[in-house]
Image (cartoon, helix red, strand yellow):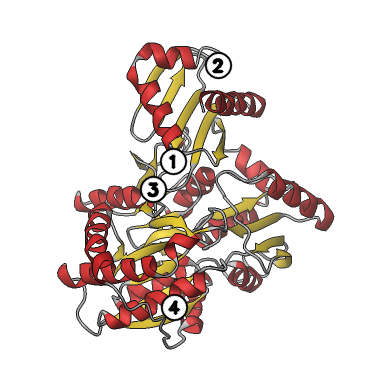
Amino acid sequence: MSLKFGTSGLRGLSVDLEGSASAVYATAFARHLLEAGLATTGTPILIGRDFRASSPSISDTCIGALKRAGFSPMDCGTVPTPALALHALSLNAPALMITGSHIPADRNGIKFYRPDGEIDKKDETAIANHAAKVEQEIRDLTPGTADDHSAETADLFYQRNIALLPEKALSGLKIGVYQHSTVARDLFVDVLKHYGAEVVALGRSGTFIPVDTEAVSTETLMLLDKWAAEHKLDAIVSADGDGDRPLLADETGTPLRGDLIGLITAGFLGAKVVVTPVTSNSGIEGNGDFDVARTKVGSPFVIAGMSEALAAGKDAVMGFEANGGLLTASSFTVNGETLSPLPTRDSFLPVLAVLSLAATKKQSLSDLAASYRLPVAAADRLENFAQEKSAALMSHLRASPDNLANFLSSVGSVKSTSDIDGLRVALTDGSTIHFRPSGNAPEMRCYVEAANQQEAEQLLQKGLGLIRIFG
């Protein structure tokens, strides 16, 4: 089977996950919860899903398996992952989100939540070990049904988000919502309207469209550009399939980078500690009154970094990824109210933080973004790039300094390297290039930083070209 744990949950081909595999992993998760003392027989467990064609059947199979394992499933429907996580935390209950996030429609996945939040790497190992045993035992694959709790799940998340800003904070702004097939599409419209924005719903789709907020496709960029001009928008808001990574474009349709969105949100919250992966912009350290901790890519590593900060007695701890997904480990006081921790990726808080700052300063999003003077960063990926090829490339580059120098000879000279996650190379001209295989899909990613947009794009294309030649 193609299934494996990656940067956030279990992922693989839909045909591999449907049927027995979804029952196996749901049962394995249940056994892990019981064995670890994280749940008891009869414990409620929440199930959510995205709009992929395969998600309903996977969800139903998981519900049946969880019932047979002694749990009491709650069907939370098609809701954003952070909404599901918030509801589960409020009940001190575990949860499963059926989603492949941004990956192609022929793939899917499961995100697992303990009663206290996302599972960690140790949990992943335990679940995988249980799954190996369950696979030999399981015979009953009967789908199940559960009571519908989608309305209360969505409302709890809605109430959280309408408490973040003053009343009518976005009045006067005209904001497009690229709805495509994200489960966040209706909640975004409702929340933005609550704050007084004029909202234009755009591009709603009945079939699943994979939107990667970290490597926005040419097709999506063309749509954003067209809509921004056609409707004279101040911003366009969207998210990936399960609504935990934001896509926020300025008045020209140009997306703001996720790490910039996270940086702005750190200021909005008054964070004292920011945890973010090595792929986030290197200029973050110089743009705020907070400590920065760098991690590997993936929400489990960010969460582990936040937990370490809390254990060290730090407060006002938050994290974000280069894809824009924002996590809070501490309570924060926002708009005179206490915002409870939500240590899983969220797309709503960062979008509202950026829009609020732009409205308060009466700045366009493009001017607001430019005011941070970060190195210009760009990223993209090669899809359908076999993981075996990615592994071979990384092994070759790590084998010797000469291999790396020769590989990069057409783009620059190596100054220093970082091997936290993938291979990040600082070049002598001040630019950066970073090669990183995807942890859960046949993709090879390339990240770059340079002095200006033209140089960044040129370096990115050269980096992708080098990968293609090797492959």
Relative to 423, 182 lies left or right: right
Q: Which sits in the foreground, 181 or 299?
A: 181
Sequence-first tag of 3 and 1 = 1
The residue under the point 36% across, 52% down is 4
Q: Amino acid at mark 2?
A: Val
Instruction: Find the distance from the CA under tag 2 to the CA under tag 1.
Output: 32 Å
Position of residue 83 relative to residue 15, above or below, is below
Mark 2 lies on residue: 411
- First of labels 2, 4 by sequence position: 4
The front one of 96 and 264 is 96
Under circle 1, the secondary element is loop
Which of discs 4 and 1 lies nearer the camera? The answer is 4
Q: Spatial distance from mark 2 to mark 4, Cα to Cα?
A: 51 Å
For mark 4, does the 10 Å Cα neighbourhood hold few (<14), some (14 to 19), or many (20 or more) residues? many
Looking at the rendered image, the quarter that the N terminus falls into is bottom left
Residue 345 is left or right of residue 31, and the answer is: right
Q: Amino acid at mark 3?
A: Gly
Residue drawn 44% across the image and 60% down it? 16
Residue for badge 3: 298
Q: Which residue is mark 1?
A: 288
Residue occupying the point 39% across, 62% down: 111
Residue named by callout 4:
60
Q: Is residue 339 visible?
A: no
Where does the image place residue 295, in percent across and percent down from the top left? 34, 41
Q: Are marks 3 and 4 in contact (CB under 8 Å)?
A: no
Q: Residue furthest bottom?
A: 147
Mark before the other along the chain sequence, 2 or 3: 3
Would you identify the image quadrant in which residue 453 lies? top right
Mark 1: which amino acid? Answer: Gly
